[in-house]
């Protein structure tokens, strides 16, 4: 959430000489999170291939953006490799990933690489000042955002700050609680639609400074492991969270 997709969308407009982005000659493919999916499947790539095979309607190019490209299934990876090997002359393919090294080498080696760095603290503080966030909340958000200005924008626009603070308090209380309380906490968290976002925020919170990292090294390691597993739809989310909290 530092601007990779925003950059890609703006690039579409520039290359097709459009004042504003339109989807007439552009296509965005990503995991259907709202439908419980966390992967990009071969059917998505077949649709992409059909899209790129057509001539541009108004611009110079047909541009396809694949968001979270590291979530391509093996079958989808093989399908997209053929497109990369023989791209259409009027087509452009943009792959976005926060974990580019997780992409297969056969794909990674065939792409031009544009690396994005997290925004500097000065830019984050300037943004928070512009949004008129008070000093206490500003300090907390600055540390938790870790340069992710897109994350900040979402938290502020959707008024999520109070909820995030409560999630952190609930988690810290569960660490020192008994078995019954831990199981209840795991169930409550598993039932939430934003469960993965909560865990992601906890990971960033526990890694905000050296003292917290040292103090919570084991917890942080287990939290990251749990995050990787429950982000896959084939695993039992509640069971994994119960195993995690009981290990604390």
Image: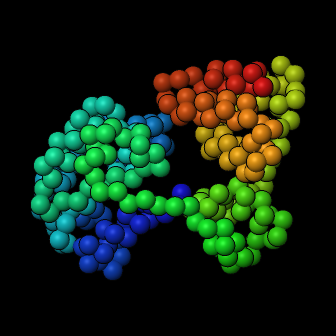
Residue appearing at x 31%, y 46% in the figure: 108
x 19%, y 53%: residue:
51
* Image coordinates for residue 244, horizontal then vertical, percent: 70, 25
Q: Does the image show residue 64?
A: no
Quadrant in which residue 54 is drawn: bottom left
Using the rendered view, name the quadrant where residue 31 is placed: top left
Q: Is residue 218 left or right of residue 35?
A: right
On the picture, is 246 further left or further right than 2? right
Where is residue 129? Give x, y as percent.
Answer: 72, 76
Position in image of residue 219 (x %, y %) = 73, 32
Against 184, residue 126 (above or below) is below
Q: Quarter of the image containing the C terminus? A: top right
Q: Quadrant of residue 119?
A: bottom right
Q: Is residue 82 visible?
A: yes
Residue 127 picture location, percent across and down: 65, 73
**On the picture, is 221 further left or further right than 72?**
right
Identified at 77% across, 39% down, the residue is: 214
Residue found 22% across the figure and 41% down from its top: 81
Quadrant containing the N terminus in the rendered view: bottom right
Seen from the viewer's position, the closer of residues 165 and 142 is 142
Count how many numbered circles sit on residues in the image: 0
Q: How is the image coloured?
A: rainbow
Q: Nearer the viewer, residue 243 or 158?
A: 243
């Amino acid at each position: 959430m530092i601007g990779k997709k925003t950059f890609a969308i703006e690039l579409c407009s520039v290359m097709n000489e459009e004042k504003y982005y339109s989807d007439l000659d552009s296509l965005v493919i990503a995991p259907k999170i709202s439908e419980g999916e966390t992967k990009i499947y071969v059917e998505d790539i077949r649709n992409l291939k059909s899209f790129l095979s057509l001539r541009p309607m108004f611009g110079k190019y047909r541009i396809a953006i694949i968001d979270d490209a590291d979530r391509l299934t093996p079958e989808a990876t093989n399908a997209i490799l053929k497109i990369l090997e023989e791209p259409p002359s009027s087509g452009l393919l943009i792959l976005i990933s926060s974990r580019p090294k997780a992409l297969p080498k056969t794909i990674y080696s065939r792409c031009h690489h544009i690396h994005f760095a997290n925004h500097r603290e000065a830019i984050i503080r300037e943004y928070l000042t512009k949004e008129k966030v008070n000093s206490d909340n500003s300090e907390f958000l600055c540390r938790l955002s870790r340069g992710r200005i897109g994350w900040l924008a979402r938290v502020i626009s959707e008024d999520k700050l109070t909820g995030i603070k409560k999630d952190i308090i609930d988690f810290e209380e569960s660490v020192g609680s008994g078995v019954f309380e831990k199981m209840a906490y795991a169930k409550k968290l598993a039932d939430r639609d934003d469960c993965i976002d909560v865990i992601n925020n906890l990971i960033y919170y526990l890694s905000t400074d050296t003292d917290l990292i040292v103090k919570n090294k084991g917890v942080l390691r287990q939290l990251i492991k749990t995050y990787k597993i429950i982000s896959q739809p084939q695993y039992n989310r509640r069971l994994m969270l119960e195993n995690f909290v009981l290990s604390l």
